[in-house]
Amino acid sequence: MKAALDVFVRQGYAATSLDDIATATPVSRQTVYNHFGDKERLFLAVIDAELRNTLEALQEATAKFPNHVVDAEEYLGDLARRLVGILLSPRTASLRLLIQTEAPRQPQLLELWRKRVSTPVWSALIGHLARLAHSGALHVDDPARAAGQFITLVTGTVWQMTELGTFAISAPPALDDHELDTAIRSNVGLFVRGYR
């Protein structure tokens, strides 16, 4: 599955054959074929597995909300770093790149991402911002809109730090990269100032 993800990302769905995937693994084309049936089923199995892995990581990152938030900026900065860490992981980056490049030919991929990953994480983030508003740490009148702004700032940080939003051009920065940390702090600070 990992080899198939790498080959699909590198070559695209149309240009990839089961032979290409078998060559990238220690198994034969027949073994790949026997297990998955055809390229489309393998592709969908890879997407499904990676969506599941990404969702699990994002749910873990957004699951924790402290009983008492003293500093909203510190809390949201930590949350943003956890989210950015997932977005920068090579497998999540590969999945995002694959969905972006294949979505014009297979629009259901964007709907899968939205339904299987974005919506559950979005709901958790709305809950966090509503709790921050309820505690008085922030003045958020519309947590759903604020969640969209927060996600835009956080994902914008990753986009900005990786030039074109993919890792095809340059390697992603490390999570402890000073520039990345500065960008995260700056964007989270902008968000918090808007809701104080």
Image (tube, helix red, strand yellow):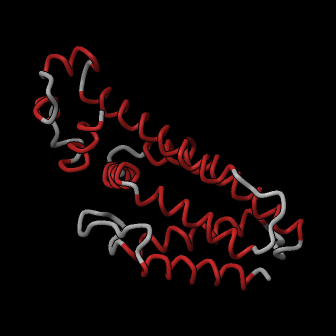
- Residue at the top extreme, as displayed: 34
Image quarter in which the C terminus is found? bottom right
Image quarter in which the N terminus is found? top left
Q: Position of residue 23 (x, y in %)?
A: 10, 33
Looking at this view, is 98 or 31 the one in front? 31
Compared to 14, does 70 lie above or below?
Answer: below
Q: Is residue 141 shown left or right of residue 177?
A: right
Compared to 92, does 18 lie above or below?
Answer: above
Q: Position of residue 155 (x, y in %)?
A: 50, 67
Which quarter of the picture shows residue 166?
Answer: bottom left
Instruction: Name the residue: 31% across, 54% down.
Output: 101
Q: Please tell me how many numbered marks the rendered image carries.
A: 0
Instruction: Name the residue: 40% across, 55% down.
Output: 89
Which quarter of the picture shows residue 83?
Answer: bottom right
Which quarter of the picture shows residue 18?
Answer: top left
Q: Is residue 82 shown left or right of residue 189?
A: left
Instruction: Name the residue: 39% across, 75% down.
Output: 161
Q: Position of residue 183 (x, y in %)?
A: 50, 80
Q: Position of residue 48 (x, y in %)?
A: 43, 34
Q: Is residue 90 shown left or right of residue 23?
A: right
Looking at this view, is 184 or 22 the one in front? 184
Instruction: Name the residue: 43% across, 80% down.
Output: 178
